[in-house]
Amino acid sequence: MIPLFVLAVAAACSSGVAKEIVLEDGQWLAAFDADSGALTRLESTATHWIVERRPELSASFRLLAPLPDRRDNFVLGQKQKAVEATQVSATKARIRWKDLASEHGGVLPITVTATITLSNGALTFAATLQNDSPLTVETVDYPYLGDLNPPSTNSSMQARTMWYGNLQSSELYPSFGNERGYWGVNFPTKAFGSHRSLFCLIQAPQEGLYVELHDPTQPYLLEYTFEQHPGLLSGANSRVPRADEISGVPVHLEFRTCHFVFARPHATATLAPVVLRPYKGDWHTGVDLYKAWRATWFKPPHLPDWARDVHSWTMLRLNTPEEDYTIPYTNLVQYGEEYARNGVRAVQVVGWNIGGQDRDDPSQDTDPRLGTREELRDAIAQVQAKGVKIILFGKLNWADLTTRRYTNELYKYEATDPYGIPYQQGGYNYVTPTQLAGINTRRRAVMDFLCPAYRDLATREFQKIVDLGAAGWLFDEVCHHASALYSFAPGHGYAPPGFIYGGDLPLAAQLRAAADRVSPDFLFSGEGPQDWLMQYYPISETGITGVPICQYIDARLPLLAGVSGFEDRETLNLCLLLHYVVQYEPYYYKGHLSDFPLTLAYGQKIDALRRQYRDYLWDGEFQDILGAKVTASGSSRYTVMLTAGGKRAVIIVNQELGKAITAKVELPNPGKLIVATPEQPAAQPTEGELRVPARSVAVVMEQ
């Protein structure tokens, strides 16, 4: 029997209709032009969202292959013919382009071979690039949608990506703000990098398109790029024209994934696969697709027992780069006694190393003007003997440009741009008017984490932290490398350029191995580590962000939120609502816990409630708002937690400053309900209607 898809292609050819390759599985219909290889139609068959609508605007790929005297030399897929377009099966196609015509460099001996597969709603684009030309192919845009449409002209559409513990949102339609600068692009453009998010959601109100870089090892940078043609209806409000044409020019939104492969002459590059999936629902459903894939590669990190228990942190700075020497090492013991009396289990100690906070990086030496190394080690031991864990703050990704060590040694490992100029991180300003004005800021070089020699140096510096006997460390700014994405510096142990973020996981593994030789309970934490880095840095310090995506992805990994107000009930309520560990920061982490007794007292009530109802409020699975509905008489916010036994807790925060609100909790098939608050922790029966005082929080639980 002849397969139906073969008959369909044959019928199209005999009738004179343009030849197509069609892949379909009940969730996607994807059609490719057999002559050009362009993606001409893309439809979510379950919801009838026609994502790619107009074949005349279709595209296949794009390459950037700079010439020695003209960097602006593209290869446009629209101007190429496919030398092979094979429908391997009903759900698999292979397309090949060869000897590509570039815009300014003639025909280049370059071959692109793409394999497209469709399986259970996952449309996967894989490709290889055979570069037999004398040019470096810097970028490959593939897949490439030339006509990305919202579900309807009356709909809306947003790009949503993950960064710093938040699911960020950027509007695509009906407004589209240019984010790359009008001077730098011909069309309004947005781009979001894989160094921050392995996925991008193209979110409409009731459905979405999930796009995934299907390689968590970060082999190179990929950008999710959107380009609005021919421009905007109005620059004043960034509105997009709604008609198919304006001034005789087609209106369309392009979407492409740009692979920064830097394929060298006479070499082959394999592109990381890109997966497209349609889904019904809001961002939760899209992130569920990421969670399912994440479960196949994410290695759950080890957490010491104390960090798995209900607990709170505080933070203390000893010194700044302006040499105030506020707290000698020996004074740390007195602070530790205060923390122990108030039930705080961990203190993040900042500015303990040479030069103070944000100076002399990456050195983890002690500062003789604060005391001796032995005095710090002894103070750490005394504080930890009282039940308070010392977490030492450190940074390894910068080199202080003002130090002799940078001049003599560290410059060898810095990241440089294509012109040989070192990248810089701007530094931070402290205490004195001169530095607060930015006049004597200590700027830093960006170190190359792909360089094995620098990773070894960083490991030796990290070993100094471990040798002090601390319970752990917090890698500040672990999530970024300033403006540097690639390093072009020679002599770093690899052929440049190198994607610096590709060194994050190897360095993390090397540091973890060093710590494990002392104790597997040595805690790694970091400032806003990307999700894949949380395999090594399981505690993230982000502060309270907009959309609590980290909690939704994995509530087992603790998040820290700083609390600095003098009666900071609002932040503490959000800590309970959004599953954050409280980190007390009186006087912006320069004071005593006794400096804000109102905040401390309420925070202790929050944690007491968590201990009393731990199954719900600490060990439960964070659901965001899924599984319940809350209506209230005033400004409020709620979330849902799910116990291992399937019982739900609904946390309702009254965001009104001066009045109580009434709230009604609706749960599908509820069991018997009880309610508790920080002020009244003994649970009382409820029918789901309750009064929440101003600036307070209530928890409704199923028994």
Image: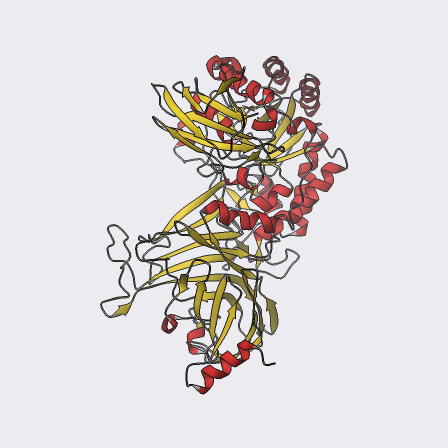
Position of 286 with respect to 554 (left or right) is left
Q: Residue at x 67, y 41 (%)?
A: 300
Using the rendered view, name the quadrant where residue 351 is placed: top right
Residue 315: percent from the left, percent from the top?
55, 24
Give the left or right position of residue 544, taking residue 535 as reference: left
Q: In this orientation, does residue 564 appear?
A: no
Q: Position of residue 70 (x, y in %)?
A: 43, 71
Where is 40 relative to 666, above or below?
A: below
The one nearer the camera, 468 or 42, is 42
Q: Residue 193, relative to residue 315: is it above or below?
A: below
Q: Quadrant of the C terminus?
A: top right
Can you give x and y, in whole percent of width and height, for residue 579 in the image? Answer: 53, 31
Quadrant into which the N terminus falls: bottom right
Q: Is residue 536 visible?
A: yes
Up/down of 336 relative to 510, above or below: above
Q: Quadrant of residue 520?
A: top right
Q: Residue at x 68, y 16 (%)?
A: 386
**Which of the 4 image quarters holds residue 664?**
top left
Q: Residue at (60%, 39%) from the top-left corner?
A: 362
* Residue 490: % across, % down: 60, 59
